């Protein structure tokens, strides 16, 4: 873990998307944060120690009222969301053209049955729902970061530039793992990786944090609101703020591999592009 000194910073952005505004000054106390996303190997250790079964591995309870079914789940089916590259695109607003709920997809089988973790032990664990990430963090004696903690750490001590290490990014000198090409039909990959990459493949930010943007989105423990102004709206009951963008973020599409970028994550189900890292709120004195 890396010790983040804490301090006051300008959170958010008014240059990209409405949900990132307004810019506001926020103070965070010192905390520790993982230098990289939790990996498949680390999560496997947790599962071996606790015999934990993730949300995507469980068959959902069937209810008479289908409206009671969490929005990300499918009745009586264990599985999760997988990106399936389409051959052609009709409308970039219709994400159902490339996101498919795949029965049997889970953290052990990220792309569904037939896929596995061979050679990916040091990749970020994905297909973990919010409660899975919380369970791991609790087992480790830690927590998921708040949105404020995450963004402060991601900025690396810089207020003035939202793009973080991404503003110097190029195909010749990639600074993060994101989509390179034309989303969602053509991807050249970052350093040859078209999905997740091993943690630490790309340069760390000024605080020494790897993959703080790109590779996978990261859960925070902050409930989703349309903007991050306190009291501006009621929080969503099942959605939590995810931060950092992923290998699926592209300049021609979402361009969310930035510290201020934020998006709602359906906490009831796993997805192929969402992982997490943990924090320790009260740093030890030694």
Image: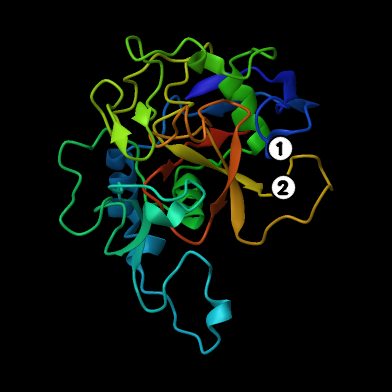
Above/below status of 83 relative to 183? below
Q: Is residue 95 above or below residue 123?
A: below
| Distance between the alpha carbons at the discs numbered 1 and 2 | 8 Å
Quadrant of residue 68 within the rendered picture = bottom right
Query: Image check: 285 left or right of 104?
Result: right
- Where in the figure is residue 200, as x and y percent of width and height? 34, 21
User: Quick one: quadrant of the C terminus?
Assistant: top right
| Residue 41, numbered label | none
Identify the residue shown where x is 27% and y is 26%.
188
Instruction: Choose mark 1 or mark 2, whichever is in front.
Output: 1
Figure quadrant of residue 262? top right
Badge 2 density bin: few <14, some 14–19, many ≥20, Cα 10 Å: some
- Residue furthest to the bottom in view is 64
Q: Which mark is residue 226?
A: 2
Q: Position of residue 113 (x, y in %)?
A: 19, 59
Q: Residue furthest right?
A: 231
- For label 1, the crowd category at 10 Å Cα-Cα, with few meaning under 14, some 14 to 19 and many 20 or more, is few
Of callouts 1 and 2, which one flags the residue occurring earlier in the amino acid sequence?
1
Question: Is disc 1 in contact with disc 2, using a CB cutoff of under 8 Å?
Answer: yes
Classify mark 1: helix, strand or loop: helix
Q: Nearer the viewer, residue 124 or 170?
A: 170
Residue 144 screen position, x and y as percent: 55, 42
Against 133, residue 285 (above or below) is: above
Judge from the rendering whether residue 23 lies leftward or rightward of residue 159; answer left or right: right
Between 61 and 233, which is closer to the camera in this rendering? 233
Point 15% across, 42% down: residue:
118
Question: Where does residue 104 sit, x and y in percent of width and height?
Answer: 26, 64
Please tell me which residue is depicted at 44% across the width and 34% down the height of the picture: 249
Secondary structure at badge 2 equals loop
Indicate the colouring scheme.
Answer: rainbow
Kindly identify which numbered label has been placed on residue 18.
1
Can residue 247 be seen in this snapshot?
A: yes
């Amino acid at each position: 873990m890396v010790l983040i000194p804490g301090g006051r910073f300008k959170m958010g952005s008014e240059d990209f998307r409405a949900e990132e505004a307004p810019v506001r000054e926020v103070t965070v106390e010192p905390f520790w944060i993982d230098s990289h996303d939790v990996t498949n190997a680390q999560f496997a250790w947790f599962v071996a120690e606790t015999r934990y079964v993730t949300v995507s591995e469980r068959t959902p309870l069937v209810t008479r009222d289908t409206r009671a079914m969490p929005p990300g789940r499918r009745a009586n089916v264990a599985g999760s969301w997988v990106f399936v590259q389409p051959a052609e695109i009709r409308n970039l607003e219709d994400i159902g053209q490339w996101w498919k709920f795949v029965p049997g997809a889970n953290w052990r089988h990220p792309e569904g049955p037939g896929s596995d973790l061979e050679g990916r032990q040091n990749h970020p664990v994905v297909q973990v729902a919010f409660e899975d990430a919380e369970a791991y963090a609790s087992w480790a004696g830690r927590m998921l970061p708040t949105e404020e903690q995450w963004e402060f750490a991601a900025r690396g001590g810089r207020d003035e530039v939202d793009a973080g290490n991404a503003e110097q990014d190029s195909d010749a000198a990639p600074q993060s793992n994101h989509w390179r090409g034309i989303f969602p039909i053509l991807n050249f990959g970052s350093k040859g990786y078209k999905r997740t990459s091993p943690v630490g493949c790309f340069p760390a930010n000024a605080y020494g944090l790897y993959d703080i943007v790109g590779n996978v989105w990261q859960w925070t423990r902050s409930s989703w609101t349309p903007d991050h102004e306190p009291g501006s709206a009621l929080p969503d009951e099942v959605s939590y703020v995810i931060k950092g963008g992923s290998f699926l973020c592209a300049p021609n599409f979402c361009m969310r591999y930035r510290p201020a970028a934020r998006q709602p994550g359906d906490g009831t189900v796993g997805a192929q592009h969402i992982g997490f890292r943990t924090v320790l709120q009260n740093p030890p004195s030694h």
